[in-house]
Image: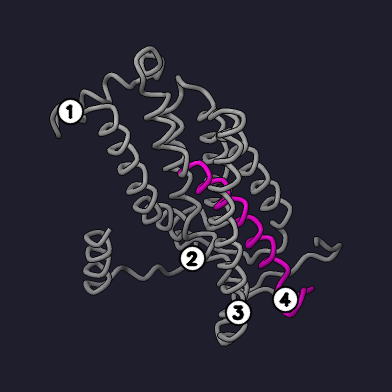
């Protein structure tokens, strides 16, 4: 979909070549998120079963770097844990942090790095996390990388969709987000089915390997479309930075409490 003449980014959106009435960058972002969600939900669907049926069994759990200290810390807070309790608690921590860290990722993008760089960092971290998931020893490291990567990517890639359109172009922006959300839903439905089937046929590590390969595809799609996205200037590089008001701080506190 790339053309010789890349879109020119302006504060009010992007101008240049379009496809089906929308900036070409929309389709790169939607495809990136399709593959990323395919990978994310595919891995997540396998996670608890993998821990209970294989990774946390005696003779295997000892291979996981840092697991003894991690389990001791959990049991110090919650008491002795069975294998299933350890698996579900780990899944709960992972899922909760995946949806909490975008607050930090959004702040990084807005204040210092910009959405493009932050999303690229997130994609790199998530790709590394999926690769680490293939090995027992790096299981906890893999979860940490996926949490940090998701924090950098989630939210910021959606913000890039909004940046493609001028402020007054509400109808096209709404339609653009509908296309973007369709990509998310396709990935979320297909990921658990396909990755789960591969894991059932060829083993858990094959399923995780497929999730990693899909994340790599997402990275390649995003890099291919870099020239089609709107430029974003972090607030730290702008002449005037409006401080957060008391109302802003209260809203942030409410969001954190809800999460």
What SS does tag 2 mark? loop
Q: Which is more foreground, mark 4 or mark 2?
A: 4
The first of marks 3 and 4 along the sequence is: 4
Q: Decide whether residue 167 is among the magenta residues.
A: no
Q: Position of residue 148 (x, y in %)?
A: 43, 43
Q: Position of residue 166 (x, y in %)?
A: 60, 81
The first of marks 4 and 1 along the sequence is: 4
What SS does tag 3 mark? helix
Residue located farthest toward the right when viewing the structure as drawn:
4
Q: Which residues are magenta?
A: 16-44
What SS does tag 4 mark? strand
Q: Decide whether residue 26 is among the magenta residues.
A: yes
Q: Would you place residue 54 above or below residue 248 in this image?
A: above
Residue to which mark 3 is pinned: 175
Q: Quadrant of the N terminus?
A: bottom right
Residue in the picture at 34% in, 21% down: 66
Q: Which is more foreground, mark 1 or mark 3?
A: 1
Residue to which mark 4 is pinned: 15
What SS does tag 1 mark? helix
Q: Position of residue 246 (x, y in %)?
A: 21, 72
Marks 4/2 in contact by CB < 8 Å: the verdict is: no
Q: CA distance from mark 4 to mark 1?
A: 56 Å
Q: Position of residue 176 (x, y in %)?
A: 61, 75
Q: State left or right for residue 9 relative to residue 48.
A: right
Q: Which is more foreground, mark 3 or mark 4?
A: 3
Query: In which quarter of the view is residue 259 placed?
Result: bottom left
Residue to which mark 2 is pinned: 238
Q: CA distance from mark 3 to mark 2?
A: 30 Å
Marks 3/4 in contact by CB < 8 Å: the verdict is: no
Residue to which mark 1 is pinned: 75
Residue in the picture at 63% in, 62% down: 30
Q: Would you place residue 44 above or below residue 257 in this image?
A: above
């Amino acid at each position: 979909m790339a053309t010789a003449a890349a879109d020119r980014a302006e504060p009010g959106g992007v101008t240049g070549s379009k496809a089906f009435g929308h900036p070409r960058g929309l389709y790169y972002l939607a495809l990136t998120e399709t593959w990323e969600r395919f990978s994310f939900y595919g891995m997540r669907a396998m996670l608890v079963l993998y821990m209970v049926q294989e990774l946390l069994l005696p003779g295997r759990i000892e291979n996981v770097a840092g697991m003894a200290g991690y389990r001791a810390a959990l049991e110090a807070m919650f008491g002795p844990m069975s294998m299933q309790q350890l698996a579900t608690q780990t899944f709960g921590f992972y899922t909760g942090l995946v949806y909490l860290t975008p607050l930090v990722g959004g702040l990084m993008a807005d204040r210092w790095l910009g959405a493009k760089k932050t999303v690229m960092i997130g994609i790199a971290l998530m790709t590394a996390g999926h690769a680490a998931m293939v090995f027992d020893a790096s299981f906890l490291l893999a979860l940490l990388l996926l949490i940090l990567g998701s924090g950098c990517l989630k939210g910021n890639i959606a913000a890039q969709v909004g940046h493609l359109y001028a402020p007054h172009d509400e109808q096209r922006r709404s339609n653009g987000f509908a296309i973007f959300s369709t990509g998310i839903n396709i990935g979320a439905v297909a990921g658990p089915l396909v990755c789960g089937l591969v894991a059932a046929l060829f083993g858990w590590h094959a399923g995780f390997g497929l999730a990693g390969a899909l994340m790599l595809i997402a990275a390649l799609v995003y890099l291919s479309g870099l020239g089609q996205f709107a430029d974003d200037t972090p607030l730290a590089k702008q002449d005037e930075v409006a401080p957060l008001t008391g109302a802003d701080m209260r809203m942030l506190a409410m969001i954190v409490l809800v999460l």
